[in-house]
Image: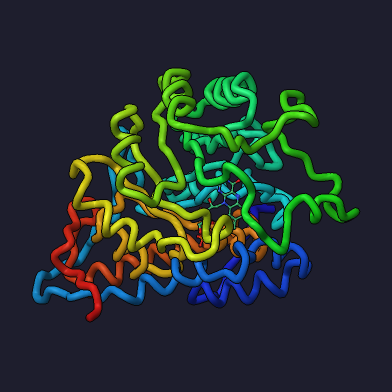
């Protein structure tokens, strides 16, 4: 019997969040939605989008807006996708495989975490377009090298190096504690099997620009740095031959009182070469959030927690529902704004509230 497509009636990310909350064990939902300390960075990421207003243009007769984006030699049908999130089998048994297939279905950008439950190779076996591989710089460069080699051997052509976790932020709901509970002690870290011993650390507090230059020299793949907030750091990435940056504060999970990612983007865009690819994550919850980030200079936008709401609701079908909903909302908002093509958008229709 063929599988009928599941129809969900969720009309917003917040409705999906409420459904995920009721589907997941309390401990898992607290881990997913948690942030560092009192959570102000996470709140600021979200509220920053309301500090900007959109100015529609009229009478442009936009019947078929295009959401396609070309960047780093890759083509995407929609300008938003999945941020790397570790341990996705906490949310659905299919874990990272479900996210990969949902992204592939929409030709959406997708990044898979170093600390995935399924290895990159397992998660992407059936995907014709391979996701980006997110790399944590471990404290042992041989392990870092091996992680890159394994991902490349499995088809990854873009590496996303996360640099905002020299040490883990102070989070009340910590993953290690969760994995020690009987319900989840069976989960594995597929990418780390056989290459990371108990004495090696997944996070490297000595990570610095010299090591970044070395990691750059290790791979011919595109190398994107994730976790940049300061324009001077972005300039230094460009000087080292980095191909793009993801403006991110790890969804507010690392530090209290960080700059919101949208404000960081608005500050960074004017002082960097105009063609340098900037990406953003953090607090993106609607199509107008996506539009605002793109208008302020992001080429692509990533979502972290909302992908996991989709997984918790229905695995691949749940993530596809999220993409379908946001895609429809984006198309409608482009028509309402008089925007024909997301790839050629400018900042002429957005203003900061006074
Ligand atoms: C449960 C969870 C796990 C995460 N794991 C990783 C990870 O393994 N690697 C990484 O670079 N970022 C990780 N992140 C951060 C996301 O990639 C992204 O920066 C953040 O979730 C974006 O904010 P949003 O959740 O508001 O969309 C994680 C985020 C969450 C919520």
Residue at 49% over, 36% down = 161
Q: Position of residue 255 (x, y in %)?
A: 55, 58
- Residue 235 vertical placement versus 64 (above, below): above
Q: Position of residue 171 (x, y in %)?
A: 67, 60
Residue most toward the right?
182
Q: Nearer the viewer, residue 321 or 57?
A: 57
| Total tally of numbered discs in the picture | 0
Q: Position of residue 108 (x, y in %)?
A: 43, 48
Residue most toward the left?
59
Relative placement, left or right, of 159 versus 167 is left
Q: Nearer the viewer, residue 126 or 75?
A: 75
Residue 10 visible, this angle = yes
Residue at 57% over, 69% down = 39
Relative placement, left or right, of 24 versus 36 is right
Q: Quadrant of residue 289?
A: bottom left
Relative placement, left or right, of 240 versus 147 is left
Viewport quadrant of the C terminus:
bottom left
Q: Position of residue 43 (x, y in %)?
A: 50, 72
- Residue 291 vertical placement versus 297 (above, below): below
Q: Nearer the viewer, residue 49 or 319?
A: 49
Residue at 63% over, 43% down = 97
Q: Nearer the viewer, residue 236 or 158?
A: 236
Relative placement, left or right, of 329 versus 87 is left
Residue at 62% over, 66% down = 37
Residue 125 visible, this angle = no
């Amino acid at each position: 019997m063929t599988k009928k497509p599941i129809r969900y009636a969720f009309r917003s990310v917040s409705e999906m969040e409420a459904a995920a909350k009721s589907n997941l064990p309390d401990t898992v939902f607290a881990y997913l939605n948690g942030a560092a300390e009192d959570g102000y960075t996470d709140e600021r990421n979200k509220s920053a989008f309301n500090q900007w207003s959109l100015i529609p243009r009229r009478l442009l007769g936009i019947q078929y807006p295009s959401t396609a984006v070309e960047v780093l030699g890759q083509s995407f049908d929609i300008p938003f996708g999945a941020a790397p999130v570790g341990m996705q089998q906490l949310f659905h048994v299919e874990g990272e495989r479900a996210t990969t297939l949902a992204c592939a279905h929409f030709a959406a950008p997708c990044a898979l975490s170093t600390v995935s439950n399924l290895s990159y190779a397992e998660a992407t076996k059936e995907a014709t377009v391979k996701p980006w591989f997110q790399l944590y710089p471990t404290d042992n460069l041989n392990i870092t090298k091996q992680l890159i080699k394994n991902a490349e051997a499995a088809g990854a052509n873009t590496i996303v190096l996360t640099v905002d976790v020299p040490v883990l932020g102070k989070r009340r709901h910590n993953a290690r504690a969760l994995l020690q509970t009987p319900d989840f002690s069976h989960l594995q870290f597929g990418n780390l099997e056989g290459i990371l011993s108990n004495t090696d650390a997944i996070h490297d507090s000595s990570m610095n620009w010299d090591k970044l230059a070395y990691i750059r020299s290790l791979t011919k793949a595109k190398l994107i740095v994730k976790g940049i907030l300061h324009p001077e750091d972005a300039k230094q990435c460009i000087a080292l031959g980095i191909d793009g940056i993801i403006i991110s504060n790890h969804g507010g999970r690392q530090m209290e009182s960080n700059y919101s990612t949208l404000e960081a983007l608005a500050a960074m865009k004017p002082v960097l070469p105009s063609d340098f690819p900037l990406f953003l994550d953090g607090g993106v919850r609607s199509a107008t959030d996506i539009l605002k980030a793109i208008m302020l200079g992001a080429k692509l936008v990533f979502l972290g927690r909302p992908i996991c709401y989709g997984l918790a609701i229905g695995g691949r079908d749940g993530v596809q529902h999220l993409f379908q909903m946001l895609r429809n909302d984006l198309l409608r908002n482009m028509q309402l704004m008089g925007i024909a093509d997301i790839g050629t958008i400018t900042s002429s229709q957005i203003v900061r509230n006074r």
